Image (cartoon, rainbow, N blue to C red):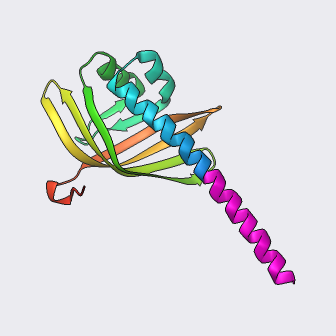
Amino acid sequence: MRPFFLLLVLFAITASISSADEALTSTLIAADDKRIAAMQNPVEATLATTFSDDLRYTHSNGIVDTKATFLDILVSGKTKYLGYDHIERSFTFPIPGIALMSGRARVRAETAKGQMDAVLSYLAVWRKEGDTWKFLAWQSCRLPPEEVKP
């Protein structure tokens, strides 16, 4: 009887963790969708509340932006995100208050150098700051065309 009880307790704990991760994932998907919408239709106040003050945004070309420089290029229109479609997006939770988001996305953007239409592999970090999940870091690289799968 005792092993059965321990198994039942273990199952209850696992189910509880799984349910919590699902709820947290839903919250982060909504936050990420809000981030993408804000990048496509940049309003400084919305972007400022979405990004962490410690933002480090490393573009696929290696250029690194801080919160201030990234807000500037978005709000000024120096960079315009025309399309942003996730192909894959998943979350893991290594420690409380931190979420790692990884996947692939097709990103279309326009800068003074021209247009970009690429599939990117990325790793992003979300951090809970107070009661709000903030976008803390992004790093991406372009995938070669032969690696792009529908």
Q: Is residue 132 above or below residue 89?
A: above
Compared to 114, does 101 lie above or below? Answer: below
Residue 51 to residue 86: above or below: above
- Judged left or right of residue 99, residue 124 is left
User: Of 97 and 21, which appears nearest the observer?
Assistant: 21
Instruction: Point out the residue furthest to the left here.
Output: 114
Q: Position of residue 64 (x, y in %)?
A: 31, 35
> Quadrant of the rendered structure where residue 130 is?
top right
| Residue range corresponding to the magenta coloring | 1-21
Asked whether, in this view, residue 6 is left or right of residue 150, the answer is right
Q: Position of residue 13 (x, y in %)?
A: 73, 63
In which quadrant is the N terminus drawn?
bottom right
Would residue 145 be seen by someone viewing this image from the given angle? Answer: yes
Q: Is 5 covered by the magenta stretch?
A: yes
Residue sitting at 34 percent across and 23 percent down? 69
Please identify the quadrant where the C terminus is shown.
Answer: bottom left
